[in-house]
């Protein structure tokens, strides 16, 4: 008989829940807003500290604590666009968004925007054309 495992990590002095693992969840929940980079979860999770201002440029997100695609490459007429990078970095996701096979959710995976809001989001950028 295996005991159910509950695992909680609270931030010191704040009492706020930062990392939570419960028997009902398949993955740990890590509060991205509260993460202070303590590296407790590094043995099981790979994390990257990106500048906070990139959050406003999130084009697509699969879910909480899951891959985020920041910005899109800009294709130019008559030019070749090459995407190079390690596995899992977002090359296929970016191409699916550019091809219209994947609708950008602008980081709102629970409540994705409609096309009108997406068009307003890219208005004035190079992607508009």
Image (cartoon, helix red, strand yellow):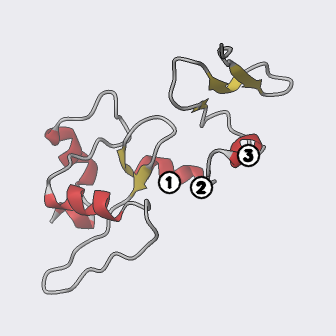
| Residue at position x 50%, y 54% in the image | 54
Q: CA distance from mark 1 to mark 2?
A: 6 Å
For the C terminus, the image quarter is bottom left
What is the number of the mark on residue 93?
A: none
Give the percent coordinates (x, y) of residue 80: 22, 85
Give the percent coordinates (x, y) of residue 45: 62, 46
Q: Earlier in the sequence, mark 3 or mark 2?
A: 3
What is the number of the mark on residue 37?
A: 3
Q: Earlier in the sequence, mark 1 or mark 3?
A: 3
Neighbourhood count class around disc 3 (C-alpha, 10 Å): few under 14, some 14–19, many 20 upward? few
| Residue at position x 14%, y 81% in the image | 77
| Residue at position x 20%, y 61% in the image | 98
Name the outermost residue toward the right.
Answer: 13
Residue in the foreground of this view, choosing between 80 and 42: 42
Neighbourhood count class around disc 2 (C-alpha, 10 Å): few under 14, some 14–19, many 20 upward? few
Q: CA distance from mark 3 to mark 2?
A: 13 Å
Is the residue under label 2 in contact with that under label 1 (CB below 8 Å)?
yes
* Element carrying mark 3: loop
- From this view, report whether residue 80 is shown above or below residue 108: below
Neighbourhood count class around disc 1 (C-alpha, 10 Å): few under 14, some 14–19, many 20 upward? few
Name the outermost residue toward the front.
Answer: 1
Q: Which residue is mark 1?
A: 54
Residue in the foreground of this view, choosing between 17 and 118: 17
Is the residue under label 3 in contact with that under label 1 (CB below 8 Å)?
no
Task: Tell me: 45 left or right of 98.
Answer: right
Give the percent coordinates (x, y) of residue 124: 25, 59
Q: Which residue is mark 2?
A: 51
Q: CA distance from mark 1 to mark 3?
A: 17 Å
| Quarter-of-image position of residue 16 | top right
Camera-near label (1 vs 3) is 3
Camera-near label (3 vs 2) is 3
């Amino acid at each position: 008989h295996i005991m159910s495992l509950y695992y909680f990590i609270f931030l010191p002095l704040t009492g706020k829940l930062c990392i939570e693992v419960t028997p009902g969840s398949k993955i740990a929940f890590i509060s991205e807003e509260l993460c202070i980079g303590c590296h407790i979860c590094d043995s099981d999770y790979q994390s990257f500290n990106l500048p906070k201002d990139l959050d406003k440029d999130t084009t697509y997100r699969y879910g909480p604590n899951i891959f985020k695609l920041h910005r899109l490459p800009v294709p130019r007429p008559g030019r070749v666009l090459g995407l190079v990078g390690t596995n899992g970095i977002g090359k296929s996701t970016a191409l699916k968004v550019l091809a219209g096979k994947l609708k950008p959710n602008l980081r709102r995976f629970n409540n994705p925007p409609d096309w009108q809001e997406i068009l307003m989001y890219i208005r004035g950028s190079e992607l508009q054309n």
